[in-house]
Image (spheres, helix red, strand yellow):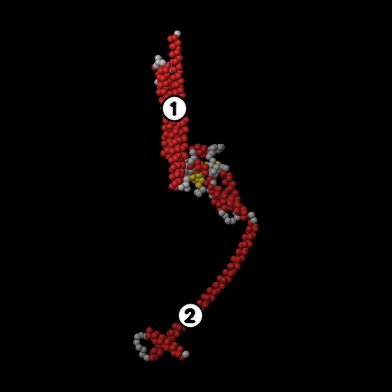
Amino acid sequence: MRPRAAGRRIIRAAAAAAALLAATAPAQQLASLDQLLERTRDARLHEQAEMRAREQRFLESRDRQAQLLEEARARWQNATDRSAALTAAFDENEKRITELAEQLEGKSGTLGELFGVVRQTAADVASVLKDSMISAQLPGRAELVNELAQSRVLPSIEQLERLWYEMQREMTETGRVARFKAGVIGPDGSAGRREIVRIGPFTASSGGVFLTYLPESGQLAELTRQPPSRYRAAAEKLEETTGGHAPAVVDPTRGSLLAVLVQRPGFMEMLEAGGVVGYIIIALACGGLLLGLARLLRLTEVSAAVARQKKQLDRPFDNNPLGRVLRVYYENPDVGHDTLELKLQEAVLREIPRLEAGLGALKILAAVGPLLGLLGTVTGMIITFQQITLFGTGDPKLMAGGISQALVTTVMGIIMAVPLLLLHGFLSSRSGDLVHMLEEETAGIIAEQVERGRTRAREDAA
């Protein structure tokens, strides 16, 4: 087998040499077998040289890979040893930390409870300082206390003293009336520095204008709507006072009552809330009052004329009811007392409509006022129920218009009826007195006429 294998290797080498010669030699026929043998030997030597070079490169690469593998194994061993050392150190540190934590807890004692109380107290104080109007004069207090409330470590003596100081300063400023200058935001959004008078944490004013505190920005701003003038006058008086005592407006709720006060609707807003029915009630009420005042002036004038007429019964005047009744008597001196009585009664009946003119209209207006108020109430409730049907009861503001109309018109109707009823009763009494006086004078005249007739009859009989 070995000779055959050697022969096959020789044949393959010759074939390779021939192929190499065919690739390198020019396309011509070799001259002799010696040249072929020489070329074959050269090709074989060349191939052996290349094989040795490749084998050398392979050996070098194999040695390099072995070296890299040894280096990697060395690094891995170092990392393994370091990991084991670090794991052991970590376990040791955990044990040490646990021991130290137990020692700290044992040594701290009740300081943990103190820390919890301090944090809770600091959080409460920070909330009070943030919402306090005093912070507009003394800014930055809430931030310092808030840091203590959010701290995760035991507070220091300085921090505890600062917390105590801020609490004491807040209590002290609560009982003081202070003047200071600070930025104020106007209704239009403009800002400017003004002199402010502050009454504790309750109210603040500048130039007779009340201010509100904005915790978000730490500034004071004018109220969009101011309270009535009497409150602003008290604020101005306090600002002008430099010593002694002065009346002041104090809101113990720190702005809540003042906010409710400025939200109360004014007179014109209440009138607008009444709607069309409210305007009708106002128009009728004004007309009834004008009519009542006119009748009052007229009856006052008639009463004065009647009083003057009583002083001169022998001279009747046409500018008063009594004078016109007396004129009937003087124009019929010779008629019988029955006829005279009828004529005088007729004259009195003619005067009664003049004296009672307008009283019926006042009575009707006084009765119509509550009815119109009831109409506005029903209309407002209809509007309210329509809003409830469309939008439900989730938002009370949607129903406020109908409820306002329902309540305001009722009040307006009652307000209209009460003075008109009083005025009607007073005018009815005045006109009734005048009519009663005319009837008394008529009865006196008739009695005088009857007595005169009897005297004449006795004289005729004698």
Where does residue 359 sit, x and y in percent of width and height? 43, 29
- Residue 84 picture location, percent across and down: 58, 69
Within the image, what quadrant is residue 416 found in? top left
Name above or below for residue 449 compared with residue 165.
above
Q: Which residue is mark 1?
A: 296
Can residue 444 be seen from the camera position used here? yes
The amino acid type of the residue labelled 2 equals: Phe
Q: Residue furthest front?
A: 461
Give x and y (percent) for residue 179: 53, 42
Q: Is residue 124 left or right of residue 23?
A: right
On residue 448, which mark appears? none
Residue at x 43%, y 45% (from the top left corner): 386
Q: Residues within 10 Å of mark 1 (few under 14, many from 20)?
A: some
User: Tag 2 or tag 1, which sits nearer the N-term?
Assistant: 2
| Mark carried by residue 58 | 2
Nearer the camera: disc 1 or disc 2? 1
